[in-house]
């Protein structure tokens, strides 16, 4: 799946690649890339039957060596040949696949590869050699035209209808194996107890914690609005831890390690939140201080203005006083002069009158 | 293929499988052992791949054929284990779940594999001890309880990788020679019809070098 997602990303922008990917999986490979890979297994059985039909000698030989066809063809189908045959051949196969709109081309191509390399395989004497040989031969299928031609012309009888028929025939056996496996797994799991509970645990309490988280988050936000919220944070943390402890007691799952991890994660998240709100509080404080400072400045400027005004008034008063003084001096000087003048005049005149 | 030159000189061909969860480092262990390579960006294995290596054990040249498989493959069938003389069970010390699953793999091995298969438990990625989730003791205790060999390895740092494979192959060799000795004592001639489990393995060996087996 990752292999052909890579192919799509090489050919188109991310979003288009994503939707193409979704389309291909939903329309062409329904049930292929699931946990149990049911359809993929069914297809392998179908392919094996087709192989037996077409190349009985080769299959006999592989049986003798203990090679399962699916070991080699499985990866071909799952990767839609990406990384299995040369690039150009992959693209040619994809052309047909997308044009026809179903996975028939996968079967035809795989059968074509077997036809091309079957004769060489018959000479191998060991399972390892056979598989390695087939893998390396498939990897050097550089004649893409020959491959596509062999696939489309040589195996016309392999049609979607025929495949469906075979799939219906083989599906029950795959389902049966899976059913048995899971039943056995369950019995085994029960007997083994603790260790395997790790698995089931992963899902349930995780969601519980998730819910709790959401609720508390809501509370926290509300608190934050009321006050700066630092205190409420720590109290919430305690609350949360308490509730989690209760949860774990109630569930009484022996999965302490997992829980410890979950709690650690939760704690880290809360600490992070606390830290960020402390930072915000600090920021607000500095902002406030600055505002206060600015207020002072206004006051001071007002006082300066006032003082300047006073200074101006005083200066005005000063000049007024000076003017007054000058005027007074003038007034005082005039009589002195006149009296002197008068005295001298009278002194000069006095002898005349004698 | 390239190995054909050695085939005539080899005394034995041993098949061994490497199993364990996906991403524990099976492919890198094998490539470290067979080619002394390590790829940090290796892609997941799908299907089956192989590694070969010729080793000398007690004057015998042994060709080890190591089967690598996809860890996520749930559809591995009994035929995968057919004829395997050794199995390497691998888990990742930084992921507890891979250690838990060892039980599952062991269960499968005991169900499908032949009974005197040599099993070695390998705790890989010992270089990542800072994010260790499984203690060495836990692995050791488990191995002792189940009667397996145990070794902690690092394919990245090439720690104990060769030793682990060699130990497995040496034990296989000892068992095989023991068996063939017993067979020689019991029957006048070693042939494929007499004997039990081990002949599945010998069959593989015999197809190539009949002369070696019967000596």
Image: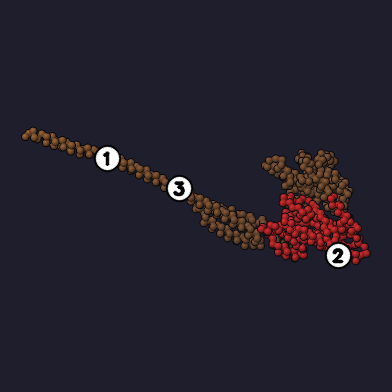
**x and y percentages locating residue B138 in the rendered image:** 71, 63
**Which chain can be seen in red?**
B
Q: Residues within 10 Å of mark 3 (few under 14, many from 20)?
A: few
**Which chain can be seen in brown?**
A
User: Residue at label 3?
Assistant: A291
Is B66 left or right of A282, judged from the image as shown?
right
Chain letter for mark 3, please: A
In the depicted structure, whether residue A285 falls above or below residue A334: below
Labels 1 and 3 in the same subunit = yes
B155 vs B132, nearest the viewer: B155
**x and y percentages locating residue A94 in the rendered image:** 77, 41
What is the quadrant of residue A319 in the picture?
top left
Q: SS class of the residue under badge 2? A: helix
Chain letter for mark 2, please: B
How far is the residue under mark 2 from the one under mark 3?
Answer: 92 Å
User: Residue at label 2?
Assistant: B178
Is A308 left or right of A171, judged from the image as shown?
left
How far is the residue under mark 1 from the one under mark 3?
Answer: 46 Å
Q: Which mark is residue A322?
A: 1
Q: SS class of the residue under badge 3? A: helix
User: Disc 1 or 3, which lies upstream in sequence?
Assistant: 3
Which residue shows up at 83% across the image and 48% down it?
Answer: A134
Chain letter for mark 1, please: A
Which residue shows up at 83% across the image and 59% down it?
Answer: B56
Labels 1 and 2 in the same subunit = no
| Residue A116 in sight | yes
**x and y percentages locating residue B93 in the rendered image:** 70, 58
- Placement of the C terminus of chain B among the 4 image quadrants: bottom right
How far is the residue under mark 1 from the one under mark 2?
Answer: 135 Å
């Amino acid at each position: 799946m990752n292999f052909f997602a890579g192919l799509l990303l090489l050919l188109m922008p991310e979003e288009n690649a994503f939707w193409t990917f979704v389309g291909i999986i939903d329309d062409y490979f329904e049930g292929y890339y699931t946990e149990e890979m049911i359809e993929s297994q069914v297809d392998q059985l179908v392919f094996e039957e087709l192989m037996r039909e077409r190349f009985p000698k080769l299959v006999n030989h592989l049986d003798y060596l203990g090679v399962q066809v699916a070991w080699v063809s499985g990866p071909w189908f799952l990767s839609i040949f990406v990384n299995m045959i040369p690039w150009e051949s992959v693209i040619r196969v994809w052309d047909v696949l997308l044009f026809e709109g179903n996975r028939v081309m996968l079967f035809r191509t795989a059968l074509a590869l077997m036809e091309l390399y079957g004769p060489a395989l018959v000479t191998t004497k060991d399972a390892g050699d056979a598989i390695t040989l087939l893998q390396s031969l498939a990897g050097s299928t550089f004649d893409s035209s020959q491959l596509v031609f062999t696939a489309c012309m040589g195996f016309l009888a392999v049609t979607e209808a025929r495949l469906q028929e075979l799939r219906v025939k083989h599906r029950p056996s795959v389902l049966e194996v899976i059913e048995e496996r899971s039943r056995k797994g369950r019995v085994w799991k029960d007997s083994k107890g603790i260790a395997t509970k790790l698995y089931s645990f992963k899902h349930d309490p995780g969601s519980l914690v998730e819910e709790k988280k959401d609720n508390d988050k809501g509370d926290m936000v509300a608190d934050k609005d009321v006050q700066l919220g630092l205190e409420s944070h720590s109290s919430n943390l305690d609350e949360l831890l308490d509730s989690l402890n209760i949860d774990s007691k109630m569930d009484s799952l022996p999965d302490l390690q997992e829980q410890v991890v979950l709690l650690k994660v939760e704690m880290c998240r809360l600490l992070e939140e606390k830290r960020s709100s402390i930072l915000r509080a600090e920021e607000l404080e500095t902002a406030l201080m600055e505002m206060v400072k600015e207020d002072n400045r206004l006051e001071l400027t007002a006082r300066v203005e006032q003082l300047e005004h006073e200074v101006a008034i005083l200066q005005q008063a000063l000049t007024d006083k000076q003017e007054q003084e000058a005027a007074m001096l003038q007034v005082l000087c005039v009589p002195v002069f006149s009296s002197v003048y008068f005295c001298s005049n009278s002194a000069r005149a006095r002898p005349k009158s004698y | 293929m390239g190995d054909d030159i050695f085939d005539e000189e080899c005394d034995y061909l041993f098949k061994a499988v490497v199993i364990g969860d996906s991403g524990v480092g099976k492919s890198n262990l094998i490539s470290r052992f067979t080619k002394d390579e390590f790829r940090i960006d290796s892609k997941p294995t799908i299907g089956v791949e192989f590694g070969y290596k010729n080793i000398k054990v007690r004057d015998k040249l042994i060709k080890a054929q190591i089967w690598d498989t996809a860890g996520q493959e749930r559809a591995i069938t009994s035929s995968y284990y057919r004829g395997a003389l050794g199995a390497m069970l691998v888990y990742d010390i930084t992921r507890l779940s891979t250690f838990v699953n060892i039980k599952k793999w062991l269960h499968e091995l005991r169900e499908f594999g032949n009974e005197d298969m040599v099993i070695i438990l390998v705790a890989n990625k010992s270089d990542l001890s800072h994010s260790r989730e499984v203690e060495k003791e836990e692995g050791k205790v488990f191995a002792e309880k189940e009667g397996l060999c145990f070794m902690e390895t690092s394919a990245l740092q090439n720690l104990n990788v060769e030793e682990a494979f060699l130990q497995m192959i040496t034990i296989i060799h000892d068992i095989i020679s023991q068996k063939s000795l017993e067979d020689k004592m019991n029957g006048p001639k070693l042939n494929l019809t007499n004997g039990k489990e081990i002949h599945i393995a010998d069959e593989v060996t015999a197809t190539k070098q009949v002369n070696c087996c019967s000596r």
